Image (cartoon, rainbow, N blue to C red):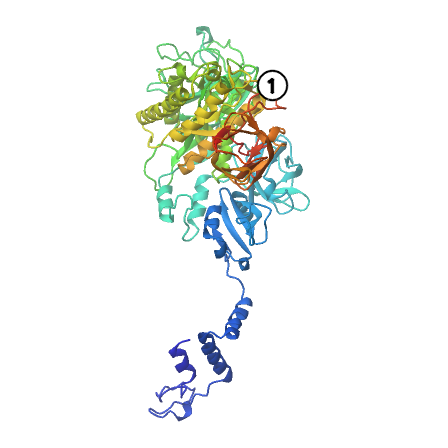
Amino acid sequence: MSVQLINEILRDFERYTGDGKPNEPVGHPLPIGDPRSGTHDPAKYRLRELLLSILQSMGDPQALQDILDQLAQKADLANAVKYFGSRAGAESAGQAALPASYGTIMTGEGGVVALRGAAVEDDDPLFATAPFWGVLIRIPVAEFVAQQIGLIHLENVEGTPDAITASMSPVLGAIQADTIFGFSPIGTNSAPDPTVTVNGVTVTLKDPDGSALPVGVLDNSEYYIWRVNTALEARLLSRPIGFNEWIEAINAVPSFEAVAGGETVADINLLQNELIEDGPPQERGSVDDLSLVASATSAGSGNIAISTPLTGEHVTDVLKIFAPVADTLFVRSWTSPDAINFTRHAEQAIEVAAGYGEYPVAISVPSGGYVGAQSSGGAIGINASGTAFSFYAGQGDAGFTDSNGTGSNSYTFTITLKSRRLKAGAAANTTFLTSVWMLGLMGQSNAVGAPATTPVTTRQRYGAIGFDNKGTLLAPLTVAGTSTVNNSEWPGMGLAHALRDSIMFAGGTSPTNVTEGMIIGHSAKGGTPIAQLGPGSAEYNGALEQITAAGNYCISIGATLNYLGSGWIQGENDIVAATPEETYEAALINIAESHDADARAALSALGFDAGRKYPLFVVQTTSGLPYAPTAEAAWAIPKAQLDASDQSPLVQVACPMYMAPFVQYNHVDGWGSRLLGAYIARAAYFWRTFDVAYSPLRAVDWWTEGNDILIAYSRDGLVLDALWQVPQQAQEGFTVYDDLGSEVPIVSVTASGNEVRLTLGTAPAPDWRWTYGEKAATGLLPYGGGAGNLRDSAGDYRSFDGVPLHNAALMQGGVV
């Protein structure tokens, strides 16, 4: 209530004086100074409001209740639920600040938003008494956004081009009418109406008008969006959309701001003016537009065909070939000042299968340069001095021969090119705005690819390329291309696959060819202690040489190299040798710090940005019990790895080893190799995106309450699960010892929120200790190392190769 309100209601006149205005009241202006017809007669309801305001100001209870009654009839404000940025923030606010009348509150907890209710007490309550504020539901952030937007990205796209299989998070429900989803197919459909089966539900892919989708429409280098109707037919909503079209669409939205980087429209326009855009694909292969020439076979060179000089800059797109046998084929480009002396500009190795096939390939071809292909049978078609052999112009599928017409039709092929041309009004720029992600891998046999490991990745996925172990030549990232010694699966394929999924999961574009793709390093040696893998060793130097080779490749295609760091899977030999914990910890930190400095030097020498840190992403070695000389030796190395991560930000533990399937007591199998690669990729991508070390599931605090030991973990949503990757373990993998080293029986193990409660038969005393994963696992043979059943719930909305990507608890312990 205010004096102004009292004066307004109890004033004497409608107007205090006649002001001569012609329209107040209408048609009857008051003479100046004559207030008679302006007398104010307040309505009774206004007087009641005034008296009620006076009573409320005096503190009258009934009058104050009238205020509450009126407010109760008002609609809630949008987003009026009380929100806290973390669980700890809500808890620290105190129970008194969270009355039951709130009904619900929300807390941000890592990757989820938790909706909490005052009366809920059975799921991670904030308080022990009412109001409890336990969890009603956890909403994964990415899924929540996906549901609002309506577009669901399909994961694990497999199967065949005509019968595709894929998965989506169960949080999003199932494919049904009006579902909108998107994915990149695995190849070109050879039949009309291909199908896609998502989590067991099969839909037929159709043209936008509902007619049959023609043969050859799907392209694995593109991304397609579909809408499902009531007949479970998915009609194409959008043709493949290029980056520049997205930029133009963004610019058309008034006052748009790019959320990820905070760029405004003006910033995006500036960026757009610097772009080189893809021109339409230009088919070349006939004598008129890509003349084929053959080298003299008598000189011992391999089968080769190269083009006439190209006008303008190009990048290769697709190799279409019929090969009589499976072979390694090199697509190469050259420069030549005189059409006699040739200098190789760029190359990419392609593993071609017998028969017809189409393969993504991306190398740059400079203006005035040449492009062609050559089998692995010999030299590049020019002699040692750089002089070309004699030429013969071939035509299309007729193949090519030597100059005497005596050669055989070994290969017929077409190389599809995309022209590089400047966008109208853009400044001169000779490169695409593209980047290549690179992640290295070092360590022992599980990094090399164990000889007993069955190959899983038999075809190149997403255009990913990589190195053979300690090699410097890039090849398709398959077992055949990058594991020539052991012919076994190694974690690099899982690294690339999961890194691509991480980019897609965060809303990035699908890197379906090598100009927007992945390079995976590979430099390791089985049966080798850490002391022999450090700076100066062939394996350490090999990792640096692969960074340089990848950088030179990126320069050749006009791309930026985004190096992330290196995975580290090692420790078995040091367990056998009983390397002291302190020695291993110091050696691991030294390798990490040296690798960071040397990687930045290598990148700087190539002209790439090297202002970031490049850590080692470590898999904790938990398999040591069957081959360790003592139980202490098996425990020392995983503890040293965890301690090193506490001492240096350049050592980041990604996951333990025990949740991966094993083929031998010390070697993971092919699927396990891919799974470890996925966990390394997730940690690396998190570091690259947020510049913060990824937090594995580890204990961060512990204390006693009566007969209980409580252990707080780094992640919420803890579950004791015997149905995920690890069968039931005794006491869920936990053990308690008294101060004399005798084992203490555990009555029960429970998990809630981010805490584990170990209930004992007696109160724990000082110097008692707890461990997790210390005892040999049961039910996991041939694996016999430590394990347990504790995990978080991260895999509820993220999976890989059909395995939910939960974080398994690290092998750890502590003194109470």
* The quarter of the displayed image where residue 353 is located: top right
Count of number-bearing discs: 1
In this view, the residue in front, 389 or 507, is: 507
Q: Residues within 10 Å of mark 1 (few under 14, many from 20)?
A: some
- Mark 1 lies on residue: 782
Q: Where is residue 178 in the image (x, y as percent from the top left)?
A: 62, 47
Q: In this view, does 713 lie above or below 82?
A: above
Q: Is residue 70 above or below residue 418?
A: below
SS state under label 1 = loop
Residue 389, quarter of picture: top left
Residue 310 spot, x, y in % from top left = 40, 26
Disc 1 marks a residue whose amino acid type is Pro
Let me know if residue 683 appears in the view: yes
| Residue plotted at (35% across, 48% down) | 266
Q: Which of 694 and 134 is in front in this view?
A: 134
Give the residue at x 59% y 51%. Answer: 120
Is residue 689 or residue 438 the one in the foreground? 689
